[in-house]
Amino acid sequence: GVSWHTYITPGNPETYGLQDYLAKAEQIIDKAKPGMPVVESELGTYVAPREVIDQPISDARLQELIDQKVQPLVIAKWPTHALSERTGSISMVANAMTNFIAGAKFFDFFGWNIDWPRTDPHWWGEKFNDTWFTMFGVAKDGEHTPSQYTLAAAVMTVEMEPVVVTRTNPIHDGKLRGAIFPKQNGGQVAVLWSIAGHQAATIKSPQEQLECVSMLGQMTMSKGVKQVDGTFLHSIDVPEEPMYIHQPTAGMSVLPVATTSGKSSNPRQETPKS
């Protein structure tokens, strides 16, 4: 088989053209030995530590610290700077999905070590080292904690656990990205995200209700509008944070994004899951 490492921090799959790189790699592999399995065996994202234990550094605050050249948030060489927990999580999940779309059989997290990063004991002003590629957070006083990045990885692991990973056609429509994956029980899960702001997506499904799970694990139920053919149309507000949309059967499809308007004409009905 083939093992690759798709480090794209501090960017995301879109900024680095990861989908095209992996497609070219698959072409080379198919010429050498068709059907050879592929795994993503190492991936790390440099996510900013915390100033206080119970609160991630916001995008705006992180930019202030980067502008002030606070180490280790700024590095002279790659990876150049840290990402916020939010943007780092988006990058990591989108990276994993891009690998699964390309046919990678599994995806490995680099940095699953509760003792990383190694601080002495405070991180503020320390130089960057490889232990900053950690799945966990650390406060300014050196106390370690799970972070939103940890949670996003855990949610992705749970939501993708029943999925049959096989090459699938990516969704690449306007600002909308993602794919629909089959499940072992015959159902499907769509993983969708927007590359800029929010994007209205219309899903056609044989199911009246679809379970929607956010990047950080919040669940809602989408209620579709019945069509004359007996199917249901669901209008989903897709944010930049990847989301998971489940149905228990096959037959889900994401309709093309309308180009004449930034909004879907289908009514959106979402209610909290009880």
Image: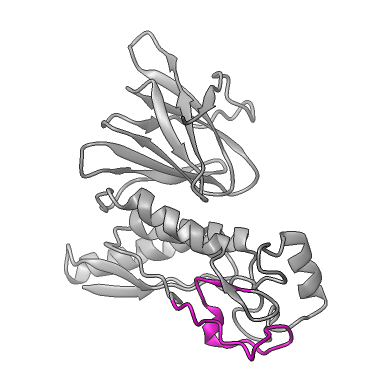
> Of helix, strand and loop, which mostly describes the magenta segment?
loop
Q: Is 260 on the left-hand or right-hand side of 176?
A: right
- 28 over 231 or under it: above or below: below
Q: Position of residue 30 (x, y in %)?
A: 22, 65
Colour scheme of the picture = one colour
Q: Position of residue 158 (x, y in %)?
A: 36, 52
Q: Is 125 on the left-hand or right-hand side of 272?
A: right
- 195 over 135 or under it: above or below: above
Residue 197 falls inside the magenta stretch? no
Q: Quadrant of residue 122?
A: bottom right
Numbered range of the magenta stretch: 113-138
- The residue lying furthest to the top in this view is 228
Query: Number of labelled discs?
Result: 0
Q: Position of residue 248 (x, y in %)?
A: 28, 32
- 267 over 141 or under it: above or below: above
The reply to whether residue 62 is in sight is: yes
Q: Position of residue 252 (x, y in %)?
A: 34, 31
- 109 over 131 or under it: above or below: above
Quarter that holds the N terminus: bottom left
Which residue: 40% across, 29% down? 210
Of 55 and 239, which appears nearest the observer? 55
The reply to whether residue 17 is in sight is: no
Of 243 and 197, which appears nearest the observer? 243
Which residue: 54% across, 19% down? 266
Residue 119 falls inside the magenta stretch? yes
